[in-house]
Amino acid sequence: MQFSYNQLFTFTESVFKSIGCPDDDAILATESLLAADLRGIDSHGVARLIGYVRLWEAGRINPTPCVGVVYETPSTAVVDGDGGLGLVVAPKAMNVALEKARIAGTGWVSVKNSNHFGIAGYHAMKALAHDMIGMAMTNASPLVAPTYSLDRLLGTNPIAVAVPAGEQPDFVADFATTTAANGKLEILQRKQLPAPDGWIQDKNGLGSTNPNELKDGGALLPLGGETGSHKGYCLGSIVDIFSAVLSGANYGPWVPPFVAFLQPPADPVGQGIGHFFGAMRIDAFRPAAEFKAHMDNWISTFRNARAVEGKQVLIPGDPEREMSAHRLLDGIPLLEPVVKDLETVGKKFGLTL
């Protein structure tokens, strides 16, 4: 089924207001969430709305958080999200990084006491309008087994970097540090399709194509595959340390689960989920116009590289940018199970999709 962006925006905003979010926060959360659907990252968009509502019902999301800086220097800060929606906490924390970069040249913010923040790319891209480079990362529920491990100790822990260009479209890299994000497994479950080789292992450490394997003690695998997963393991570890060990959030196996039916660990080592944001003012390094002209040259060089037959060399951000333009015009497709979940949420609050 197809839904217009405006239709989904109105419904989602009303849901966030219904759980007690102030008007401005409801708008901010809706923009954050729908950015995923627009960019074709269906696993992190309105498909997750029911999950946020269930966390609120379980008392694990504060709809009216007092988000604030609890420690800072001229170029760094720690932000306490007060248990709020990550969709709200993260943009506010990124704004702190942007303001510090405006004054000091760079800004670095680590966040504690937050929740799932949607797609990392949305937050990193906030820097583009300011002629800055943006970075965003977050730790997540422990569903990933480090190389050679049977234990789930890391999350999918995404990294996003957004770099402005001049005439060319901006460079936006946004990726999980696992072979695939957990949300991709959720989509396969809804479609009743197998997972590709190399995505997951069973509880004994053997490869599996069962998208439900995590429910039986299996784990997602780090980026890099059979001979290179140590690289994804390292990247995921860096995200965990920057986001949580640095801020005072929970890390490793202590990160609280996104699903409300699983309780957070009884012995937390920190507060909530952690994020990390960076902003770098380009003119702190070289004139912005000069830099963006060279980014145009960089992008054009890679885009025009010789490609294997039937393929095209893409720039990070190309597929998502094209998808956004298409979906704003033609609507956002939702799977039937997602529509049913949204209808369930709507009935709860007397809303119509």
Image (tube, helix red, strand yellow):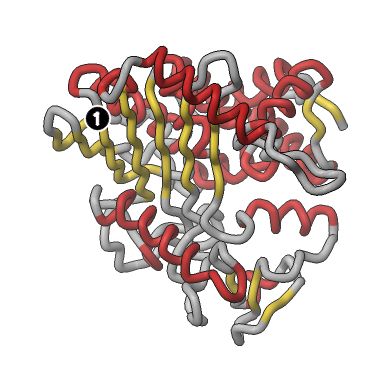
Q: Residue furthest left?
A: 73
* Residue 42 position in % (x across, y down): 70, 40
Residue drawn 20% across and 35% down?
77
Q: Residue furthest bottom?
A: 204
Q: In this rendering, is residue 220 above or below 316?
A: below
* Residue 342 position in % (x across, y down): 72, 36
Mark 1 Cα-neighbour bin, 10 Å: few <14, some 14–19, many ≥20 = some
Q: Secondary structure at mark 1?
A: strand
Along the viewing direction, whichever of 164 and 6 lies nearer the viewer: 164
* Residue 175 position in % (x across, y down): 56, 47
Can residue 117 be seen from the camera position used here? yes
Q: In this rendering, is residue 233 above or below 273?
A: below
Left or right, 66 with respect to 125, comes to: left
Can residue 18 be seen from the camera position used here? no
Which residue is under mark 1? 68
Residue drawn 67% across and 45% down?
43
Left or right, 217 with respect to 332, comes to: left
Q: Quadrant of the C terminus?
A: top right
